[in-house]
Image (cartoon, rainbow, N blue to C red):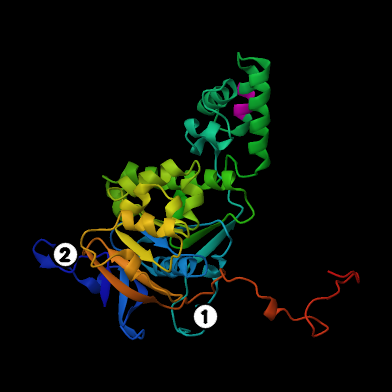
Amino acid sequence: MHVFGRAEAESTAGSLRDDARRPTGRLGTYRARDGSDAAPVGVDLDTPHAALVVGKRGSGKSYTLGVLAEAAARADGIAPVVVDPMGVFSGLTAESATGDGSNADADPVRATVVEAPTVAAESLPPASWPALLGLDPESPAGTLVWQAASEGASLSAMRDHVADADAGDAARRAARNHLRLADSWDVFEPAGLDTRDLLGGEATVLDLSGIPDAPSNAVCAAVAGGLYERRASIASTSVAESLRLPWLFVDEAHTFFDGVAANALRRVLTRGRAPGVSLVAATQRPSALPDVAVSQADLLVAHRLTMQTDVTALTAAQPTYLAGTIRERLPTRTGDALVVDDTTESAHAVRVRNRDTPHGGGSPRASRVVSATGKGGNERSETGARL
């Protein structure tokens, strides 16, 4: 099986490594010229990677992210964390690997869902607080919030700092109101997520569905920053050898690169390899990502794209070794993908495998509605009122 992201002749001390013992995720198969499935292909999970999964809505982007998360959850030495803004990855916790029934004998996926996750206020850099609350950092209220975040480890302590600050009434009132807004999000708790708990033996899905973009960004920033700092702090010690390598999966990544999570994600992208932190970002809008998110990806999985701006964004970072253009090689069928592998400097047409666990990213269909009347709709609730 060909493994994307892994040099074919990697060696240690002059001898080839035993590939069978290196964590590998099953991605799918090569796509033959006639559209049929060919030889199986996988993704390297043994070393850190920065990967980007793109595709228009309905092309298989989130499905592929789930396939990769499944693989990472089954791999030894890996700690997958899924940032799930749409609430579509809870299927990873299915008790048995049933999926669509095509691989019923697959090993179960070890995963847990954290609904409405919380983080400590102090896990965010003080400089990010004005932007998080929509304040100009150079305004009196923005400066006051920045100072409060520097001095206080919790929202309560930040509010106390504001109340006692030597500042104008207007600045203190604005800062107090914005901190009250942050409190209403219910994502800041002193006993929030501990990144050490995310490095255990199973995948963790952070369900952010129903949470606005700003507090979702706060959670993502705290988790991405915490995972990086935890690994960086022990990277040169013996502890690192016994600690699982974190793989951070981020769906709808453009939402987070456009918010306060951007700096933490950029740091993982550009500096995560040394401490051993991987990032897999998925988006239907690659044109909305910063250039670094595309240029730093050593693995690109591109599904169908039709927006000119999105295709242009990928083309601008197209590697010189790619035969033809990305535009010419983009697939047209759902589930098909173009994989650009910078490790081996090659590009391949693939068909992503079926999920082994249920996928929650499908859209509701009116044709599937079944009502008590058999005509669709007009169902009555228990109180007799029409819904």
* Residue placed under numbered mark 2 in the picture: 10
Residue 36 falls in which quadrant of the image?
bottom left
Local crowd size for mark 1, using a 10 Å CA cut-off: few (<14), some (14–19), many (≥20) = some
Measured as percent of width and height from the top left, residue 337 is found at 38, 71
**Image side of residue 154 versus residue 103, left or right:** right
* Residue placed under numbered mark 1 in the picture: 98
- Compare residues 73 and 302 and report the one nearer the observer: 302
Measured as percent of width and height from the top left, residue 365 is found at 66, 75
Residue 1 falls in which quadrant of the image?
bottom left
Mark 1 is on which residue type?
Thr
* 364 vs 120: above or below: below
In the drawing, what numbered circle is on residue 230?
Answer: none
Judged from the image, the secondary structure of the residue bearing numbered disc 2 is loop
Q: Which quarter of the rendering shows the C terminus? A: bottom right
- Compare residues 348 and 174 and report the one nearer the observer: 348
- Compare residues 255 and 356 and report the one nearer the observer: 255
- Compare residues 20 and 262 and report the one nearer the observer: 262
Residue lying furthest front in this view? 308
**Image side of residue 39 versus residue 192, left or right:** left
Residue 69 visible, this angle: yes
**Image side of residue 269 versus residue 306, left or right:** left
Question: Which secondary structure dominates the residues rendered in magenta?
Answer: helix
Mark 2 is on which residue type?
Glu
Measured as percent of width and height from the top left, residue 316 is found at 32, 54
> Rounded to the nearest whole Å, what is the CA distance between mark 2 and mark 1?
35 Å
The segment highlighted magenta reads: 157-161
